[in-house]
Image (cartoon, rainbow, N blue to C red):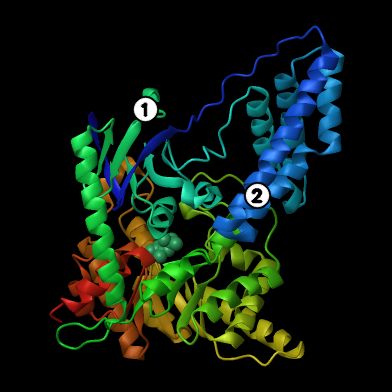
Amino acid sequence: MEVYQGHKISGQIAIGTIYLRREEQERIVPETVSDAEAEVTRYEEAVKKAASDLRALSSKAEQNVGAWNARIFEVHAMMTEDVDYREEVTRTIKSKNLCAEYAVFLTGEHFSKMFSDMEDDYFRARAQDVKDITDRLIRTLRGQTRAEDPDEPHILVVGELTPDDLIRQVRSRILGIVTERGTAYSHASILARSMGIPTLSGISPDPSWNGRKAILDGIRGTLIINPDPSTVKEYLGILSERAEREAKQKSSRTEPAVTKNGKRIPLLANIGDLSELETAKQYGAEGIGLLRTEFLFLNAAQVPSEEEQYAFYRKAVETMGDRPVVIRTIDIGADKPARCIPMPEEDNPALGNRAIRISLSNRELFTAQLRAIFRAGMHGNVSVLYPMITSEWEMKEIAEIEADVKDSLKNDGYTLAPVRRGIMIETPAAAVLSDRLSEYADFFSIGTNDLAQYVLAVDRKNYALERYYNPRHEAIMRLIAATIGNAHKKGIPVSVCGELAADTDVTEQLIALGVDELSVSPSLLTEVRQAIRESNV
Ligand code: PEP
Ligand code: MG
């Protein structure tokens, strides 16, 4: 039995078999073959297998992450079978007597370059898809599997996890995640927590772990490889106690989130996918305080249309009935690149073209999203929330665009319902200017994840600087206090939706500062509700 200490990302326990995902592709060498015809046949068989694997993956993913997110696999299957791509591979094998792996590699390089040189955003975004299918074909030719990971439930061990990666995973198969790099505040970690997947980081994997039994303890932050029988028994006991406790906690979901002195703090949920709605309701969310719409875009082969977005938002709104749903406009960029919205490489993406900046520079994209949100507003209690605001001029521009969108919807015959407007306070500028920004908003929502990143000048994803990244830092607390003071002067409420909202050590402090509402990952609702009920404010 070996025990490794890591960092806690998502505090649950998993027991299962390790699957170590290899990151580097073995070098592809230009070997020659004596029988080119046979090599072409081998390639065509690989095409068939890769396409059928992708289609199987597509239907499985559909059950777990929804039809929209699963579509990428169907698109990849079609690209794998593309006639031009296949002709070029066949020609390369025959003309140079090259092995299929190398011919595929050359063709992939050629096609992805061709796409990335194109003017049109849609076609430029295809370059990554070409790389993905090329990697898959090479792995298939080599008899290797990777991207889809094993079918059996497993503990995934990987260098670094991306949000995109998590969305692609078939959730029921991942018992837990261990990453070498990654902080608690990266979007991938937030997503893992939100999905309730036990997760640890800061553990360097050893290739010999693959296939071994392990216990991932997200509460103590340990990974136990080859646990001895008494340890397994101990953990099975902990798991069943936890299950009992959770069943009891679930029954406490209807208890009101009220402090000991009778202050009511509405407790809402942060979600990124419709599949989280049920967990949110199960744990008694009083609404959706943050719907991260970018997750709808991350894996999409093309920008979701107004209709597709409308269907998605409407489903969230209708599921929540008369409870509020706060829909945040896309926060794409930084560690959430979307393949359907290609952007030039940036040296400092967290300080780059991100969130509202992308919306304001792409009117068509922004308008379609706002139309979908306002239309969804006709079905329930909806607010729109704008991320990464830094200046008043942005809000003026947004207000004008909103007015145009509403006019055009009315012209199209829609009878709109009121939709409240919120501003994310997640940049130092927004917190400092919150007195002025309150003129443009019906409410504020404080995003402590980014606020900490930008106030403390620490990349929220940089594992090496973790001790500098402290959302409880006094500078953050003062900015929260100032924001609340300014908002309350204008009579508008303030919610906290960053991860600090779920930090039960500061629940009382946040309420004492005057926070009106908290929004947290669905799986953390119970703990936070308990902390509110124990607060002496
Ligand atoms: C935040 O920054 O605190 C926030 C809630 O937004 P995100 O984590 O999606 O950047
Ligand atoms: Mg943010």
Q: Position of residue 25 (x, y in %)?
A: 56, 25
Q: Relative to 505, does residue 95 appear above or below in the rendering?
A: above
Q: Quadrant of the C terminus?
A: bottom left
280 sits to left or right of 393: left
118 and 525: which is toward the camera: 525
The kind of residue tagged 2 is Ser
Residue at the (69%, 71%) spot, across then down = 306
Q: Position of residue 385 (x, y in %)?
A: 49, 75
- Chain-order first, disc 1 or disc 2: 2
Find residue 184 and name its label: none
Q: Quadrant of the N terminus?
A: top left
- Tell me the residue that label 1 is attached to: 209
C-alpha separation, residue under disc 1 versus residue under disc 2: 29 Å
Q: Are marks 1 and 2 in contact (CB under 8 Å)?
A: no
The kind of residue tagged 1 is Trp
196 sits to left or right of 466: right
Q: Position of residue 60 (x, y in %)?
A: 60, 50
Does ligand 1 reach within 8 Å of label 1's beta carbon? no
- Tell me the residue that label 2 is attached to: 58
Element assignment for label 1: helix
The quarter of the picture where residue 39 lies is top right
View extreme (left): residue:
536
226 and 412: which is toward the camera: 226
The quarter of the picture where residue 305 lies is bottom right
